[in-house]
Amino acid sequence: MKLYECQHCGQVLYFENRKCERCGYRLGYLPEKGLLSALEERGGAWLALGAPEQHHIFCANAEHDACNWLVGDNAGQSYCVACRHNGTIPDLTLPQNLLAWRKIEAAKHRLFYTLLKLKLPLATRSEDPEHGLVFNFLADPPDQNAPKVMTGHDNGVITIALVEADDAEREKRRSTMGEPYRTLLGHFRHEVGHHYWDLLVRDGGHLKAYRALFGDEREDYGDALKRHYNEGVPENWQNSFVSTYATTHPWEDFAETWAHYLHIVDTLEMAAAFGLQVRPQIPGGKDLSVVIDIDPYRSGDVQKLVEAWLPLTFALNSLNQAMGQSDLYPFILSPKVIEKLGFVHDLVRARS
C-alpha cells in the first residue's frame, strides 16, 4: 500500500479516503492506474484530475458507501474490478449487516489492490464458470441450532462469515483457537491463496516443486484436519512452518505462506512510502539497521524483502509493546519458511 496526494491541493491521502479533508474534493480510486484521484463532476460523470483523458462513474456499491472505486463511463460496467467478483452479499436492510459488509469490503479492496499490482489472473465467475473468483459474504442463520457459516474456499468460491467483521467475536475466536493473529484482511489473503494454488501450482505445472517443499497435497484433508485438532502441532514446528495452522496440510501451508507474502509486500510498500529507516541506537544494533527504499512488487529476490522485513518487524513489535499491545507481527521466519516464501515469490514474479 502507498500514500497518495490530492491533485487539487496537495493534501496527503490514504487508500480509503472518500473526500479530501483540506479542499473537500470527492475522491475515487482508479484501479487500472493504481491511483486515488480528486474528482470534478462533469455532466453526470466524474473527471479524475489524475487521469483526465476519460470520464468515470462510481462503482454501484458506492451507493452503500462500500466502495470508492471508479469505472470508465463507456466501459459498460456498473461494478468496479473488485466488486464484480461479489456473488452473495448480506441483507443490507439490516443496519448491522450493512456496517459489517462495509468492513469486509474495505479488507477486500485492499486485497484487490495487491492482486492487481502483482498482475495475477482475476477472471470473474461469469468469465470463467469453472475457476472464476467469486466471494460470498454470508450471515449466520437466525436459528441458533443451525450450522454456522464457515469461512473457506472451494474451487474459486470464497466464503467469508459476516460475523468475522465483529471485532469482539473475531477476537474471541482468535483467543479460543490459540491464534496470534486474526483479521479480515488476513482471511482474504489466506483464502485467495487456495485459489491461486489451483491456478498457479496445480494448473501451472509446478506440482513437483511444490510437493518437494510443502509436501504431498494428496494426503486426505479430512484426516489431516482431525489429526491437527486432536493431536496438536508437531514439536519444533517453527523450524518449517510460518504458523501452527500451516502444519495442518500442505494446502494450508501454502495458503498461510501466500498470506504472509502478501502481508510482507504490502507493508513494505507502505514503509517505503513513509521513508522509514530502522537504526537502533545501541552498539550492537548494526545488524538491525535498514533503509526501506525498495519496491517490493518489483524486487527479483525474496531475500531482499526478508532483509528489510525482519528489522522493520522488530521495530514495530517493540513499538506495539510500548503501547501495551501484542506484537504486530507475532511470527518467526525460519530459513525453511523463507524458502517457501521464495517459492511464492517466484510464482508471482513469473506473472508480472
Image (cartoon, rainbow, N blue to C red):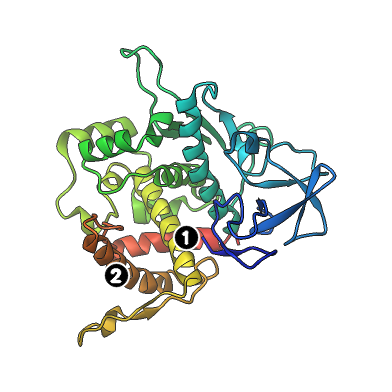
Q: Residue at x 41, y 61 (%)?
A: 264
Could you tell me if residue 311 is visible in this image? yes
Q: Residues within 10 Å of mark 1 (few under 14, many from 20)?
A: many
In the rendered image, the residue lying farthest to the front is 23
First-in-chain label (1 vs 2): 1
Q: Are marks 1 and 2 in contact (CB under 8 Å)?
A: no
Give amino acid for label 1.
Asp
Against 316, residue 121 (above or below) is: above
Secondary element at image label 2: helix
The residue under label 2 is 315
Quadrant where the C terminus lies?
Answer: bottom right
Q: Position of residue 88 (x, y in %)?
A: 55, 26
Label placed on residue 326: none
Give the CA separation, mark 1 to mark 2. Answer: 17 Å
Residue ID for mark 1: 266
Q: Specify the quadrant of the image occupied by residue 251.
A: top left
Quadrant in the rendering for residue 76: top right
Q: Kindly identify the residue that appears in the image at 49 percent across and 53 percent down.
A: 206
Q: Nearer the viewer, residue 230 or 181?
A: 181
Q: Secondary structure at mark 1?
A: helix
Horizontal and vertical percent position of residue 262: 45, 56
Identified by mark 2, the residue type is Ala
